[in-house]
């Protein structure tokens, strides 16, 4: 049976958090939805908990798969979704009681996407409440891109609603070979077909900061793994999309790409020669854009050194790391 909204929730080893997440959705003010709960090969009891929640709530459909990552889990949900609109929730996060009602109310025949702001917080800091909302409308792709990249809404998929027909007609899915920054690629693919969007000014999604998350790992850890190679590559793709929309947004995306190439190259445990060449070539060609933004000068100096000699750069900026 078709519903207004399909909510896709991938779940991998989140037995301690999943029930709170599901309860926050089920107790919301909007009820014409289905939940596609994807157990991505969990080994901690998440699978049996998912089945129990489906018995409790008929709106939940559970899919058990071998562990194949976030992109594949979300794609499985998309392939089975019957809703006119698509939303995503991460299984360790919480939504405000009226988040989905507010977002669905934004959608209409001429609206391709709706988004709300989000709050990063620790679980013990949660203060979930229904919030009255006001509307802000972005009239075109450029304004929508600006909201996503610089307006505080981010390229994340979990604080937005999408039209299922746009996703399906244009074969928009999460990249199967991508194990980080999946949301950026998806958002940029969708933006190419998004002509008008509505933005809520209120924080209705609660992104729970946990140890080991992508954000905390990249920020806090001195060394990172190969998954983070996609960080500058995703911003590079963003730059390509921005070329047809806005010179300013293109330059900002390009500068972030240059910055992230240097940061990832500095933090990678064992950068291979192909990635080093990719990073050095891009930085060399684009380092001048760094001078336009507040984070730029130290990265500009780093870029100058990297353009001259990677071994020299590595001795300076990968201090104590074997090259």
Image: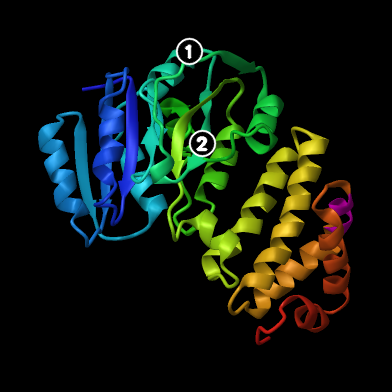
Compared with 215, 92 (above or below) is above
Please identify the residue farthest to the front as the structure is shown.
124
Residue 209 appears in view? yes
Residue 89 appearing in the image: no
Q: Main secondary structure of the magenta part?
A: helix
Residue 135 appears in which quarter of the rendering? top right
The residue to which callout 2 is attached is 119
Q: CA distance from mark 1 to mark 2?
A: 26 Å
The residue shown at (44%, 36%) is 206
**Residue 106, relative to residue 293: is it above or below?**
above
Relative side of 141 to 49, left or right: right
Count of numbered tags: 2
Residue in view at x 38 percent, y 31 percent: 95
Closer to us: 29 or 3: 29
> Is residue 146 toward the left or the right of residue 294 in the image?
left
First in sequence: mark 1 or mark 2? 1
- Other-residue count near label 2 (Cα within 10 Å), few / some / many at <14 / 14–19 / ≥20: some
Which residue corresponds to the image point at 14% horizontal and 51% vertical from the top-left?
48
Query: Could you tell me residue 256's position as x and y percent?
Result: 73, 51
**Residue tagged 1:** 108
**Mark 1 or mark 2, which is nearer to you?**
2
Q: Residue at x 61, y 57 (%)?
A: 231
Q: Which residues are magenta?
A: 287-291
Image quarter (top left, top right, bottom left or bottom right) of the N terminus: top left
Q: Callout 2: helix, strand or loop?
A: strand
Whole-percent x and y of residue 107? Answer: 47, 16
Q: Is residue 242 left or right of residue 100?
A: right
* Picture layout, residue 46 above or below residue 79: below
């Amino acid at each position: 049976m078709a519903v207004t909204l399909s909510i896709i929730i991938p779940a991998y080893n989140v037995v301690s958090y999943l029930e709170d997440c599901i309860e926050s959705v089920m107790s919301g003010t909007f009820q014409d939805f289905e939940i596609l709960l994807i157990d991505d090969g969990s080994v901690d009891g998440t699978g049996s908990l998912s089945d129990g929640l489906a018995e409790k709530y008929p709106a939940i459909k559970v899919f058990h798969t071998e562990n194949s990552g976030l992109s594949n889990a979300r794609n499985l949900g998309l392939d089975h979704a019957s809703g006119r609109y698509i939303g995503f929730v991460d299984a360790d996060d919480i939504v405000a009681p009226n988040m989905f009602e507010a977002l669905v109310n934004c959608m209409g025949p001429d609206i391709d996407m709706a988004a709300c702001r989000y709050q990063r917080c620790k679980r013990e800091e949660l203060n979930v409440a229904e919030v009255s909302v006001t509307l802000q409308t972005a009239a075109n792709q450029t304004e929508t891109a600006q909201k996503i990249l610089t307006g505080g809404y981010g390229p994340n998929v979990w604080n937005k609603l999408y039209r299922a027909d746009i996703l399906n007609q244009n074969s928009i899915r999460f990249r199967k070979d991508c194990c980080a920054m999946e949301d950026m690629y998806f958002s940029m693919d969708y933006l190419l077909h998004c002509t008008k969007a509505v933005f809520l000014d209120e924080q209705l999604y609660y992104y729970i900061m946990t140890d080991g998350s992508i954000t905390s790992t990249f920020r806090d850890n001195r060394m990172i793994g190969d998954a983070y190679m996609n960080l500058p590559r995703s911003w590079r793709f963003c730059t390509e999309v921005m070329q047809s929309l806005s010179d300013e947004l293109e330059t900002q995306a390009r500068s972030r790409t240059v910055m992230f190439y240097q940061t990832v190259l500095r933090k990678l445990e064992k950068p291979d020669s192909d990635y080093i060449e990719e990073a050095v070539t891009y930085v060399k060609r684009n380092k001048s854009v760094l001078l336009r933004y507040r984070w730029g000068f130290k990265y500009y100096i780093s870029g100058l050194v990297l353009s001259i000699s990677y071994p020299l750069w590595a001795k300076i900026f990968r201090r104590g790391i074997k090259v």
